[in-house]
Amino acid sequence: MAYFVIRHQHPADRCPAKDPQMGQMLLNHLSPANAAQHGITLHGEAVIDGQHTLYVIAESDDQGKVDAFMQPFGMAGTVEIWPSSSCSAVVERRGCAG
């Protein structure tokens, strides 16, 4: 299983949270149970206040699954996904790869 750090950003005028139905749909989409159905484990998510930026830490055996899972967020703005490692994995291999 690999870790992924995800950043979604959107302009203020396209904020999904302004629409109660869209906001609820995205919350449901980000639920651990729904993520698991897509082969993804979510380790955390947070929105930076006032910046319309969401960060997610996810784990999956396939980045394609993560790409597909994050597609709904692409309707409102950008989605960037970076392959990542846990801190313990970095220490174990004695440094950041790349």
Image (tube, grey):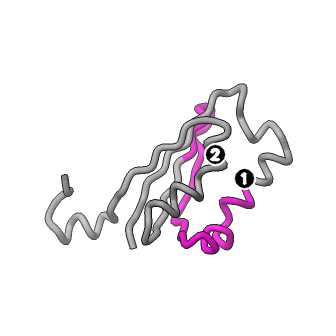
Q: Which label's residue is closer to the chain start, 1 or 2?
A: 1
Name the residue at 80% across, 46% down: 22
Q: Secondary structure at mark 1?
A: helix
* Image quadrant where residue 12 sits: top right
1 and 2 marks in contact (CB < 8 Å): yes
Name the residue at 57% across, 45% down: 54
Task: Tell me which amino acid carries mark 2.
Answer: Phe
Q: Position of residue 24 (x, y in %)?
A: 80, 53
Name the residue at 19% across, 71% down: 92
> In the shown orientation, is residue 31 left or right of residue 81?
right
Q: Secondary structure at mark 2?
A: helix
Q: Position of residue 27 (x, y in %)?
A: 72, 56
Image quarter hosting the N terminus? bottom left
Which residue occupies the foreground of this view, 3 or 51?
Answer: 3
Which residue occupies the foreground of this view, 20 or 79?
Answer: 79
User: Can you tell which mark lies on residue 36?
Assistant: none
Q: CA distance from mark 1 to mark 2?
A: 8 Å
Above or below: residue 54 compared with residue 31: above
| Residue that mark 1 sits on | 26
| Residue that mark 2 sits on | 73
The stretch drawn in magenta includes residue 39: yes
Which residue occupies the foreground of this view, 86 or 2?
Answer: 2
Name the residue at 62% across, 67% down: 35
* Image quadrant where residue 8 sits: top right
Which residue occupies the foreground of this view, 89 or 61?
Answer: 61
The stretch drawn in magenta includes residue 21: no
Q: Position of residue 82 (x, y in %)?
A: 39, 51
Magenta span covers which residues? 27-54
Crowd tier of the residue under label 2, counting other residues whose Cα lies within 10 Å: few below 14, some 14–19, many 20 or above: some
Task: Tell me which amino acid carries mark 1.
Answer: Leu
